[in-house]
Image (spheres, rainbow, N blue to C red):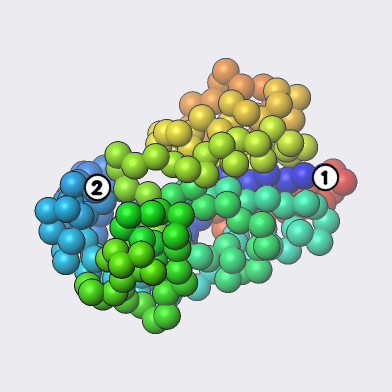
Amino acid sequence: MKLVVLTGAGISAESGLKTFRDSDGLWEGYNIYDVATPEAWERNPELVQEFYNERRRQVLAAQPNLAHSILAELEKDFDVEIITQNIDDLHERAGSTKVTHLHGVITKSQSNIKSSLTYQINGSEIRMGELCELGSQLRPHVVWFGESVSMIEVAAEICKKADIFVLIGTSLAVYPAAGLIDFIPSSVPKYIVDPKIPEVRRYKNIIAIERTAVNGVASLKDILLNNE
């Protein structure tokens, strides 16, 4: 059976990574529009580069938590496809083999003029003056506000094929990712793991697990394996 899992910041928060955008509109003390837009990059690329270098150091220092590990273990029993809004690589490090990153992954760089031209970063930094093969400055492989989410169509096709859908640690507030639940067939069971369940009353077959990611995914594993 195909188990499609959409994860958000809540799953990585339990590994010590702060959510992308807190209620005050700041990320690690920075206004997001000063560090996470194409205009910010044009205005002050050194600041943006260093901001993401520091976020990358945090990601590399973090470890996958039990929720990440359980999702990887479920590959023994299900065809698991993970779609994540997160820019960390914790799913991969936990052992998941099918991970689609909607917003890029911070452990890679990309060309400033051709976003599909990406490179694995050696170490934790991209330095100003590091160029892609086309001669353009390398930048973080992250989708900024105002940029298109190129993987959304791939993710939508994955969602259409789900036999079971799981939503973990996301408020369904950020589009276009929030719209992916609309591509899940109505007859498919939809598990939602979050301490605060988002508004989903218009959808059928919702099973709410109102817990944090680690505790909730442990419960989910028991439910799924007992229902097989």
**Could you classify mark 1 by the number of other residues whose Cα lies within 10 Å: few (under 14), some (14-19), or many (20 or more)?**
few
Using the rendered view, name the quadrant where residue 148 is placed.
Answer: top left
Q: Amino acid at mark 2?
A: Thr
The residue shown at (50%, 65%) is: 89
Q: Which mark is residue 37?
A: 2
Q: Which residue is mark 1?
A: 1
Left or right of 6 on screen, residue 4 = right
Residue 111's x, y, as percent?
A: 36, 61
Left or right of 220 on screen, residue 86 = left
Query: In the rendered view, would you say 199 is above or below 93?
Result: above
Residue 72's x, y, as percent?
A: 68, 62
The residue shown at (24%, 47%) is: 37
CA distance separating discs 2 and 1: 39 Å
Residue 224's x, y, as percent?
A: 78, 47
Circles 2 and 1, Cβ within 8 Å, touching? The answer is no
Q: Is residue 153 visible?
A: yes
